[in-house]
Image (cartoon, rainbow, N blue to C red):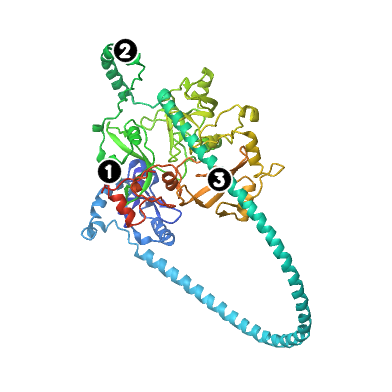
């Protein structure tokens, strides 16, 4: 009986006439458009099924034409449920020439003309009914207005007579009052002129103080950013050299190990014969560059070009990451979807497919991480979501499924801060170092990191720099990372509050490479800070910052310690850009930022000034404007006119790839 019942069920095959896509109907979405599923056995539970002798399909088509805004975009074909997987390729071939194959398609094609005509008639009837009701209401309103106008005219005539009489009496009083007002006005103008002169003098003094303070803040911010970038690069370099936990595949690790064993005797002989003299002379030995885990010949570079990316346009750093099973930084890719080419931001990586071949995988930028759906068999709790949003790391070990084998394994979970993609790495693929820079990690501290927890630690680099950092395993980097300071600083107070803070050197760099530099002279800092705060320690109100005049809301936000957006700011080349101002309570003064300091940003934002500031202020290179001589303007990521296009194309005719 069950088998017989299945044979009497049909499904609908839908063709999107706009894109040519053909799939099985799985229902209607909130907009009335068909939900679609592939004609595969594993998706059969999603198919919308119809009794072959019932009227369910009739109800479906009526709902479709009533809800969908463009119903003629879709064509429907009725197919037996048990044969849809086999018939779908045949229908696809027939639809390549629907006119020539009309007779073959006719038994399956659903005639929608009756539904379309019924919907149009219903719409016409409703509009006609509404128009009739509207006309009746308008007629009634017109009659009422006519009656009211007649009554109003009578009242207005009576009122006009009364007003005329009253005006005559009032004119005499107004003349007397005008004389008195004129006299008072003359006296008031004199007082206002005196007050205006005093206010002008005070404003001039205030503007001078604000300009001086702004110049000091700009100078300190410039020093802070430079020092922060230097510390970040130094920490990153040392940590990479000594504590790199870049994971290698088992196959490549074995291959590299064998090569090293073969080369050891030769290396030993070379050191014995030649290595003593440089050591005696005190010359530094050059570290041989490690070979890439992926050979150039193993990569299908044409696949890269299909995404609109050329190999020669990738930076050396991106190529190094790509050829060692890592991810590039954000690059602009141009995939073809539905016959149209789109320009999207993504990171690229090479991954092995089931057949052993390397496949280029784009990791597109997502609006936000998908924390509300299970990830590889694990469901995030509210605490998990909060931890991932705050630091980008889950902060504990969980069991997730291997995407290739389905086997559950213990892993670290993080969010890729550039793309918002959720990533995981098995615990056995991450090595916990025993020291960071010159700072040793105790066994207990290593166990804290091994458990995925965050470890606050004062770190000393080889150059003697010290700074407070938050260490934690990051699954995307497959290593122990410095958690960006702006993500963890608000969650916990520093040890010893104010006392130990005085003993600390510059703080750990935040996500933008900025570092808050302590004032060298405490008395001078207090003297400057007094101009930004009141005697009770509250923030002193200001009305503007350079060329940006504050609204009342911005004034209130500034006094409350919130971020104020400076829409009329200028970069170092004098070009308009967007910056952010916030009062720093530790420094006792306002600081400007190129990114919003209140946002725990986990993805490279589509900031209208990001490329501009990176090129004009930080000296970075944007491939699309590499040869443009003029400073970039706000929102500019490509040549703005024919003159700049000629500058860009003159050195090299091929089109460069824009690198974020």
- From the viewer's perspective, tell me whether residue 380 is left or right of residue 523: left
- Image coordinates of residue 90 in percent, x first then y, are 24, 50
Q: Which residue lies furthest to the left in this view?
A: 100
The quarter of the picture where residue 531 lies is top right
Could you give the CA–CA distance between mark 1 and mark 3, rounded to whole angstroms? 48 Å
The correct choice, above or below, for 647 with respect to 312 in the image is below
Alpha-carbon neighbours of circle 2 within 10 Å: few (<14), some, or many (≥20)?
few
Give whichever of discs 2 and 3 has the lower sequence position: 3
For disc 1, the marked residue is 305
Q: Nearer the viewer, mark 2 or mark 3?
A: 3
- From the viewer's perspective, tell me whether residue 478 is left or right of residue 285: right
Alpha-carbon neighbours of circle 1 within 10 Å: few (<14), some, or many (≥20)?
some
The dot on residue 535 is none
The correct choice, above or below, for 526 with respect to 83 in the image is above
Element assignment for label 2: helix
For disc 3, the marked residue is 215
- From the viewer's perspective, tell me whether residue 80 is left or right of residue 595: left
Q: Are marks 1 and 3 in contact (CB under 8 Å)?
A: no
Closer-to-camera residue (327/394):
327
Alpha-carbon neighbours of circle 3 within 10 Å: few (<14), some, or many (≥20)?
few
- From the viewer's perspective, tell me whether residue 253 is left or right of residue 182: left
Q: Which of marks 1 and 3 is in front?
A: 3
Could you give the CA–CA distance between mark 2 and mark 3, rounded to whole angstroms? 56 Å
Q: Which of marks 2 and 1 is in front?
A: 2
Element assignment for label 3: helix
- Image coordinates of residue 220 in percent, x first then y, are 54, 40
For disc 2, the marked residue is 276
């Amino acid at each position: 009986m069950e088998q017989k019942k299945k044979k009497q069920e049909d499904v609908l095959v839908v063709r999107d006439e706009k894109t040519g896509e053909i799939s099985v109907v799985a229902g209607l979405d909130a907009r009335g458009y068909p939900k679609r599923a592939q004609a595969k056995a594993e998706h059969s539970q999603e198919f919308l099924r119809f009794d072959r002798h019932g009227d369910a399909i009739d109800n479906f088509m009526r709902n479709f034409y009533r809800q969908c805004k463009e119903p003629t975009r879709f064509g429907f074909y009725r197919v037996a449920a048990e044969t849809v997987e086999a018939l779908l390729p045949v229908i696809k071939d027939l639809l390549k020439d629907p006119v020539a194959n009309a007779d073959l398609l006719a038994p399956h094609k659903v005639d929608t003309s009756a539904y379309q005509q019924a919907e149009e008639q219903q719409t016409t009837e409703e509009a006609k009914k509404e128009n009739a009701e509207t006309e009746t209401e308008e007629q009634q309103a017109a009659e009422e207005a006519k009656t009211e106008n007649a009554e109003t005219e009578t009242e207005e005539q009576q009122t006009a007579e009364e007003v005329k009489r009253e005006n005559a009496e009032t004119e005499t009083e107004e003349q007397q009052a005008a004389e008195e007002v004129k006299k008072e006005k003359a006296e008031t103008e004199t007082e206002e002129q005196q007050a205006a002169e005093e206010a002008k003098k005070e404003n001039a003094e205030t503007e001078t103080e604000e300009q001086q303070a702004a110049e000091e803040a700009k100078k300190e911010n410039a020093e802070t950013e430079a020092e922060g970038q230097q510390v970040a690069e130094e920490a990153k370099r040392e940590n990479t050299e000594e504590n790199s936990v870049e994971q290698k595949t088992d196959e490549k690790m074995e291959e590299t190990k064998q090569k090293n064993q073969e080369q050891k005797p030769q290396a030993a002989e070379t050191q014995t014969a030649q290595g003593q003299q440089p050591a005696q002379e005190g010359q530094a030995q050059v570290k041989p560059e490690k070979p890439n885990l992926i050979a150039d010949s193993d990569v299908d570079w044409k696949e890269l070009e299909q995404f609109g990316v050329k190999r020669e346009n990738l930076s050396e750093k991106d190529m190094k990451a790509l050829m060692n099973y890592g991810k590039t930084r954000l690059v602009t890719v141009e995939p073809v979807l539905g016959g149209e080419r789109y320009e999207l931001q993504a990171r690229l990586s090479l991954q092995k497919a089931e057949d052993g071949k390397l496949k280029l995988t784009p990791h597109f930028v997502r609006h936000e991480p998908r924390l509300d759906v299970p990830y590889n068999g694990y469901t995030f709790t509210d605490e998990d979501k909060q931890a991932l949003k705050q630091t980008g790391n889950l902060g504990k070990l969980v069991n997730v499924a291997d995407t290739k084998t389905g086997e559950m394994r213990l892993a670290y979970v993080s969010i890729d801060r550039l793309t918002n993609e959720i990533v995981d790495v098995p615990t056995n693929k991450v090595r916990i170092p025993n020291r960071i820079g010159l700072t040793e990690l105790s066994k207990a501290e290593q166990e804290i990191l091994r458990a995925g927890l965050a470890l606050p630690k004062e770190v000393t680099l080889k150059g003697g720099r010290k700074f407070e950092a938050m260490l934690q395993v990051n699954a995307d980097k497959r290593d122990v990372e410095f958690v960006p300071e702006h993500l963890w600083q608000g969650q916990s107070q520093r040890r010893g509050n104010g006392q130990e803070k005085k003993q600390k050197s510059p703080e750990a760099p935040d996500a933008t490479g900025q570092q808050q530099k302590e004032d060298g002279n405490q008395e001078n800092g207090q003297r400057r800070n007094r101009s930004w705060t009141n005697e009770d320690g509250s923030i002193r109100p200001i009305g503007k910052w350079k060329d940006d005049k504050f609204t009342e809301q911005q004034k209130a936000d500034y006094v409350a310690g919130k971020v104020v957006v400076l829409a009329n700011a200028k970069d170092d080349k004098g070009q308009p850009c967007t910056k952010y101002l916030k009062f720093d309570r530790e420094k006792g003064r306002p600081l400007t930022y190129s990114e919003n300091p209140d946002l725990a940003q986990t993805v490279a934002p589509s900031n209208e000034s990001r490329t501009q500031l990176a090129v004009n202020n930080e000296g970075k290179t944007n491939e699309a404007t590499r040869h443009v001589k003029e400073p970039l303007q706000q929102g500019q990521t490509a040549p703005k006119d024919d003159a700049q296009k000629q500058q860009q194309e003159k050195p090299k005719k091929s089109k460069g790839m824009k690198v974020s």
